[in-house]
Image: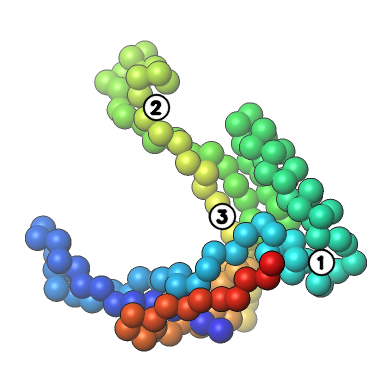
Amino acid sequence: MAIKYRLYQDNRAESKNRGKWYARAIYPKTPKTTSDLAQMIQDNVSVKKSDVIAVLDELVNVMKLWLQESYRVKLDGFGSFKVGLATKPADTAKDFSAAKHVVGSRVNFQPETHWSAASGGHHRRVFLDDLQVEETPANAVVKEETNP
């Protein structure tokens, strides 16, 4: 399987790349859910789907707690999560206040990487090993069967 993409043209008036073409990944399939993930894990190991769902639900609760306590959460073989902040500038450090200058937050994810001499000494991201890409046919819509 391959990541599907569509081409788009940069039409921004101020852009130095105006008129150039780029690929943008698309996701035409039905999103996968916790239930789908639990089913596939159950199919691959000797754990019941209900147990997997309970563990995944608790994973979300524990990660939320730790992230909000300023921990970085690393899942071995998966990657790391941390909270990032969007702030407005203050003229001086003394003038900075969280209530006035912190304007947003987000969760940053860094997939696990492995250094490889075989790849020319580059780091490779686990989720992107052997990734293939292909252009999607125009107006392609993929509908998957859903299990009741």
Query: CB of mark 2 within 8 Å of CB of mark 3?
Result: no
Picture quadrant of residue 85: top left
- Residue 6, position as x, y percentages in the image: 34, 77
- Residue drawn at x 67%, y 57% is 34
- Residue drawn at x 36%, y 13% is 94
Q: Which mark is residue 110?
A: 3
Say above or below: 50 vs 136. Answer: above
- Residue drawn at x 42%, y 78% is 141
- Residue drawn at x 41%, y 71% is 26
Q: Indicate the quadrant containing the C terminus: top left, top right, bottom left or bottom right.
A: bottom right
Q: Nearer the viewer, mark 3 or mark 1?
A: 1
Q: Tell me if residue 53 can be seen.
A: yes
* CA distance separating discs 1 and 2: 42 Å
Q: In the image, what residue type sits under mark 1?
A: Gln
Residue hosting label 2: 102
Q: Residues within 10 Å of mark 1 (few under 14, many from 20)?
A: some
Total tally of numbered discs in the picture: 3
Judged from the image, the secondary structure of the residue bearing numbered disc 2 is: strand
* CA distance separating discs 3 and 1: 26 Å
Q: Earlier in the sequence, mark 2 or mark 3?
A: 2
Q: Nearer the viewer, residue 140 or 103?
A: 140
Q: In the image, what residue type sits under mark 3?
A: Gln
Q: In the image, what residue type sits under mark 2?
A: Val
Seen as rendered, the residue at the extreme top is 94
Quick check: 99 left or right of 47? left
Residue hosting label 1: 42
- Residue 4, position as x, y percentages in the image: 44, 78
Seen as rendered, the residue at the extreme left is 13
Quick check: 90 left or right of 69? left
